[in-house]
Image: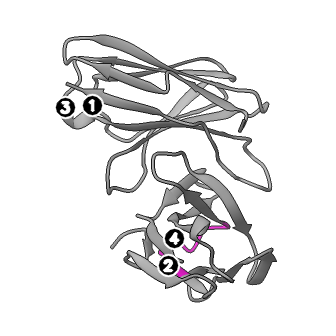
Amino acid sequence: ETGVTQTPRHLVMGMTNKKSLKCEQHLGHNAMYWYKQSAKKPLELMFVYSLEERVENNSVPSRFSPECPNSSHLFLHLHTLQPEDSALYLCASRQTPATNEKLFFGSGTQLSVL
Amino acid sequence: QKEVEQNSGPLSVPEGAIASLNCTYSDRGSQSFFWYRQYSGKSPELIMSIYSNGDKEDGRFTAQLNKASQYVSLLIRDSQPSDSATYLCAVYNTNAGKSTFGDGTTLTVKP
């Protein structure tokens, strides 16, 4: 148990479906992140929420929509995805500012878009 | 040029050997440096962090940092098959509030 819980662990969806990924952190951190990891590619930062305010959006397609209702919960809403969106989606959290800026990752959601 | 570059893999070493993983970074404002280990199909887990120049040892792992050369490395002594994984170098700039990851180096330790 890393203190960052993601659900579901696996998700298969069609291109017309709408689904949401959920992340919850139990570490008292104030910043949460969504990362995408595709096969043989580096981690891609998608969204950052610090103190519940979105501070970064790396030109992610609008079919991905984040939501951060409070400092412990983070959602990623998915709609009309494409097959190339199939990847491992990782949630992470950290305390900022802090002397140790370590990221704590959840177990990830393995997403397959058919 | 990538912001964080790691030695291209895959890297294969025999069991018991020293595995050397290298990482260079371009942002001179980076203050914190991390090595994550990621097993296939799993999420990254932090194994080492280093903040000042020199060596930091933790069990079989040694991280080395040289800020002047913008270089950070990870040595794994007495490599075990269970060390086979992808190792990610991450660099954090506190002022920018930004973490940047390298592409990762895949290590295979052969029995």
Label pair 3/1, CB-CB below 8 angstroms: no
Q: Kindly indicate whether the residues beneath marks 3 and 4 are on one polypeptide chain.
A: no
* Secondary structure of residue under mark 3: helix
Residue position marked by numbered label 3 in the rendering = A83
Residue position marked by numbered label 4 in the rendering = B27
Identified at 63% across, 78% down, the residue is B79
Residue B19 versus residue B8: which sits nearer the camera? B19
Q: For residue A13: magenta?
A: no
Write down the region rendered in magenta. Answer: B21-33
Q: Tell me which corner region of the image, top left, top right, bottom left or bottom right, holds residue A27.
A: top right
Q: Is residue A24 left or right of residue A77?
A: right
Tell us which disc is closer to us: 3 or 2.
Answer: 3
How far is disc 2 from disc 4 in space, using C-alphas? 10 Å
Give the letter of the chain under mark 1. A
- Type of amino acid at the residue the image marks with label 3: Pro
Q: Which mark is residue A61?
A: 1
Residue B67 versus residue B57: which sits nearer the camera? B57
Q: Position of residue A68 (x, y in %)?
A: 56, 20
Identified at 32% across, 57% down, the residue is A40
Quick one: label 3, few (<14), some, or many (20+) residues within 10 Å? Answer: some
